[in-house]
Amino acid sequence: MPIRQFLGATILGILISGLTAAALPRTAGAASDVFTVSGVEVDVTAATAAAAREAAHAEGHRLAMQKLLARLLPHDELPRMREMPVPDIVPYVRDFEVDDERTSDVRYLARLTFRFKAEAVRTLLRGEGVLFAETQSKPVLVLAVYGPASEALLWEDENAWARAWAVHRPGEALVPLSVSKSM
């Protein structure tokens, strides 16, 4: 690919990324919500519905803390963080809410949202001596362009790069990604 085409494509990509970042919707985990973990799915069966609900809420606390730590800590710092039992997690939770709750006589299913106490979590992480970040960047738009410049595919079905990105699940990372799949 000639350097002129390469530079043109690179500049175009930077312009598109910069122009669309401001227009993209904020995602879960936005800067004001870095310490909020949404979409925690629980499904527990126990002797009674009440016991299942109690166990599911405990499991939700554990899963939410895992998601929060995965968001705030670099991957190589995660193993340095100690495993926390649920009673140790509870003091770091400001509150939680139940979304889409379903029960039977012995089963409890729900999607939970947890809001953590920011300063308490910071103190915990500093005390554990792990590196962490809590500042979320502006969203990044990924345009899956594939092929040589003369035959570049963007939204066509033959675009293997777009198919690979299509399985991308938006996470709650500090760098939110938006993948363009169609015009």
Image (spheres, rainbow, N blue to C red):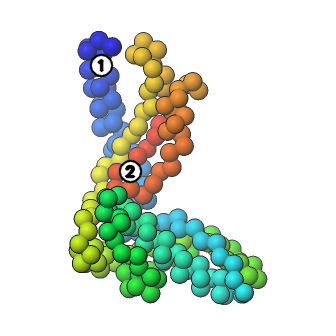
Write the residue at 46% across / 14% down.
151
Residue 55 numbered mark, or none: none
Crowd band around label 2 with a 10 angstrom C-alpha radius: few (<14), some (14–19), many (20+): many
Write the residue at 53% across / 39% down.
166
Taking 169 as reference, is 11 left or right? left
How many tags in the picture? Answer: 2
Distance from the alpha carbon under mark 1 to that under mark 2: 26 Å
Which residue in the structure is indicated by mark 2?
A: 176
Q: Residue furthest right?
A: 105
Q: Position of residue 71 (x, y in %)?
A: 37, 61
Q: Residue furthest front?
A: 79
Given residues 86 and 79, the one toward you in this image is 79
Q: Position of residue 88 (x, y in %)?
A: 40, 85
> Which quadrant of the structure image shows residue 163?
top right
Instruction: Give the quadrant of the N terminus.
Output: top left
Taking 144 as reference, is 81 left or right? left
Element under label 2?
Answer: loop
Q: Vertical placement of 59 versus 158: above or below?
A: below
Which residue in the structure is indicated by mark 1?
A: 6
Residue 84 visible in the snapshot: yes
The residue under label 1 is which amino acid type?
Answer: Phe
Write the residue at 74% across / 82% down.
106
Q: Vertical placement of 160 versus 167: above or below?
A: above
Residue 33 visible in the snapshot: no
Write the residue at 37% across / 81% down.
92
The residue under label 2 is which amino acid type?
Answer: Pro
Mark 1 vs mark 2, foreground winner is 1
Q: Vertical placement of 33 versus 136: above or below?
A: below
Crowd band around label 1 with a 10 angstrom C-alpha radius: few (<14), some (14–19), many (20+): few
Element under label 1?
Answer: helix
Q: Position of residue 180 (x, y in %)?
A: 47, 37
Q: Position of residue 167 (x, y in %)?
A: 54, 43
